[in-house]
Image: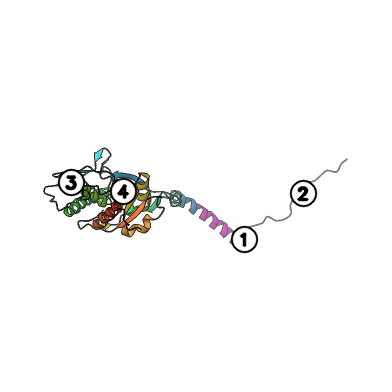
Amino acid sequence: MPAESTPTTDARPARRLTPRHRALALCAVVLAVLFVVAGLAPLPFTRTWPGATADALGSYQGHQVVTITGATVRPTSGALRITTILATGPQESISLKQAVEGWLDPKVAVLPRDSVYPQGNLTQAQQQMTQAQDSATTVALNYLHLSPDQVKVTVDLGDIGGPSGGQLLSLAIIDKLAGDGHGGDLTGGRNIAGTGTIDDSGTIGAVGGVALKTQAAARDGATVFLVPRGECADAKVNTPAHLQLIPVSTLNDALSSLAALRAGQQVPAC
């Protein structure tokens, strides 16, 4: 008869983890949990991307952007585009995954939420836009030596808030009332975009999201972008092809540069 086989057993003792190995294993588990939590936890950041543009010489969302009464309004050609950015809501948080995806996407910017929504206050953004409209009107009428008691300017930008449309609104008011002063348009028929705050003295201030606004401008056909001088470096990030960046510090800078463009002369560049 064949010999019966007998089961064999491993006589080696089971390997036990040393205290050091147990500690390392525990740390690995804790780190894994932390990474999972971090990936899911909301972060105080906002994703932003190129928004709409509004031609200050035309209409936006079905309404004339600049309406003037008390003075003769001239027909215009070309465009003066106010540029905007879109963003996740002030109460909306993003995850680490969404933040990383945004950082890797050249058409998206991830910014601290408070830099986009100061204290999450949407009312403040509308108040800033109202102030920008008032300053744009004041500086434009002062430039033209017109009295606000006789000339009334109304601005309707729909859902666009914030002060960054001030520069383009001033230029649009001047273009509608006086053009280049010689029967022509400030734009020279060009599709011009830009951004920048403006105060009653005509000083043009920095805004934000310029690298996204240049993309919105190029998408909507602009070939020239008027950028606050201090934001040239930001504007040059991923600048769309064929978009000419012109730095400006004051309303007079903007008007001088537009005059040089119309004359085919050299203009400042970022």
- Label 3: which secondary element: strand
| Foreground disc of the pair 4, 2 | 4
Return the residue nearer the eye: 45 or 177: 177
Disc nearer the start of the sequence (3/4): 3
Disc nearer the start of the sequence (4/1): 1
Does residue 57 lie above or below 33 as drawn?
A: above
Residue at image position (37%, 56%) is 234
Q: Say if residue 92 shows up in the picture.
A: no
Return the residue nearer the eye: 261 or 124: 261
Name the spot of residue 216 as percent of width and height, x first.
Answer: 36, 47
Q: Residues within 10 Å of mark 2 (few under 14, many from 20)?
A: few
Q: Say if residue 231 shows up in the picture.
A: yes
Asked if the residues shown at circle 4 and circle 2 are in contact, with their CB atoms under 8 angstroms apart, the answer is: no
| Foreground disc of the pair 1, 3 | 3
| Foreground disc of the pair 4, 1 | 4
The circle drawn on residue 8 is 2
Q: Quadrant of the C terminus?
A: bottom left
The circle drawn on residue 153 is 3
Amino acid on which the number 1 mark rests in the picture: Thr
Residue that mark 4 sits on: 192
Q: Which residues are magenta?
A: 19-33
Name the spot of residue 115 as percent of width and height, x first.
Answer: 33, 54
Q: CA distance from mark 3 to mark 4?
A: 22 Å
| Foreground disc of the pair 3, 2 | 3
Task: Give the residue at the far bottom of this rendering.
Answer: 20
Disc nearer the start of the sequence (2/1): 2
Amino acid on which the number 3 mark rests in the picture: Val
The circle drawn on residue 18 is 1
